[in-house]
Amino acid sequence: MTLRQEFLALAQQPETNFSELCRRFGISRKTGYKWQHRYQQEGTAGLADRSRRPEHSPRRSGPAIEQQVLAVRDQYGWGARKIKKCLERDGQGPLAKSTIHTILLRHERVTNAAHQTVGPYQRFEHERPNQLWQMDFKGHFRLGNQERCHPLTVLDDHSRYALCLHACRNQQTATVQQQLTATFRRYGLPERMLMDNGSPWGNDLTHQYTPLTVWLLRLGVGVTHSRPYHPQTQGKDERFHRSLKVEVLAQRVFADFARMQWRFDEWRHCYNHVRPHEALEMAVPASRYQPSPRSFAEQLPPIEYSSTDQVRKVQTNGKIWFRHREFQVGKAFGGYRVGLRPTMADGVYDVYFATHRISQVDLHRSSISPRAD
């Protein structure tokens, strides 16, 4: 159900390639049009495997509205603003936020403690979907079977659309690459990804590249690292983690990975398609997201350089020889070729891996300068 709803939400976005979207979701165009027709005729109920649920009741009286307010609160734990938006979106309203808050107070779902007054937030977001994705691990925790769960999260910067929420067994490169591959196949490639300096996508300030980020560069995805000890650089993903903790993980223990992933999938759909987002003027992230037109390449493209580039092969120790001198590039590039291009400064060369500038070589110094993000 949630996959079909997600498919239809993405299909309604302008300029979406319907055939390509069907391919990414693993269905035929005939099946895609069938889901569209059923949804137009029957709404969400038409997406079920022919197990019909009762239609919504006609407009209800006051007590019925009150029960709906409590039901949304008990299911999601939302406050009056989100409950108001949710009910009005379903045709129940208009409702006053104060009325909903009074209902919650009367049934002891909230307290009437004075709310802390804060100033207006300064928010920055990219202009279009897929210009930047933020990626991070939520802090790990123990499941009921005593295994450690490491939630991997990927969020679109423009729309706040949650592209990946997966319960991982570890934070190793192979695990992250497997989940990113599945995400890229469904949503396409972003222009750039932002991540912190931790494993497996960070190393240190001098050598910022790892096998995982080199793989991203080969796919044509730019890599940016946040400033050390500045989690606010990834503020949208950090805020997503806070919502995840409050609405899913707080005061709960899940038995195993299967149950944890089932709950993650359920909540991700709610977050993207149901839950009003205050930073989006109470719209849902799905209303602002559409898949990337850049499809994932199953076979990595060859690395090519122009005839004017001075090409050198990186040794296994991460070094190259250039002008009878040795320079450190980074062990993550061991075995690959890089291209050197002269700059306007005498004796200074930009170092490129594929189409990405990764650093500079200064012949006046014996070391390589790190790339400035």
Image (spheres, helix red, strand yellow):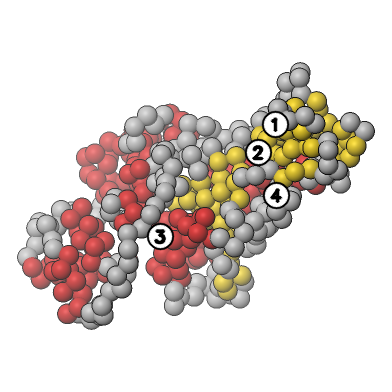
- Mark 2 neighbour density, 10 Å: few (under 14) some (14–19) many (20 or more): some
Amino acid identity at mark 2: Leu
Q: Which mark, residue 216? A: none
Front position among marks 4 and 3: 4
> In the rendered image, which quarter is residue 263 located in?
bottom left
Q: Gap in Å between the C-alphas at discs 4 and 1?
A: 17 Å
Return the residue at label 2: 217
Q: Which mark is first along the chain, 1 or 4?
A: 4
Return the residue at label 4: 208
User: In this view of the protein, which residue sits in the foreground, 257 or 130?
Assistant: 130
Q: Which mark is first along the chain, 2 or 3?
A: 2
Q: Is residue 263 above or below residue 195?
A: below
Return the residue at label 3: 267
Tell me which residue sits at (24%, 58%) in the image.
86
Front position among marks 2 and 4: 4
Task: Say if residue 256 shows up in the picture.
Answer: yes
Tell me which residue sits at (71%, 55%) in the image.
204
User: In this view of the protein, which residue sits in the foreground, 267 or 157?
Assistant: 157
Q: Is residue 143 above or below residue 299?
A: below
Amino acid identity at mark 1: Ala
Q: Gap in Å between the C-alphas at discs 3 and 2?
A: 31 Å
Q: Gap in Å between the C-alphas at discs 4 and 3?
A: 33 Å
User: Residue 268 placed where, x, y %?
Assistant: 42, 56
Q: Which mark is first along the chain, 4 or 2?
A: 4
Q: Gap in Å between the C-alphas at discs 2 and 1?
A: 8 Å
Q: Which mark, residue 354? A: 1
Tell me which residue sits at (66%, 30%) in the image.
355
Q: Which mark is first along the chain, 1 or 3?
A: 3
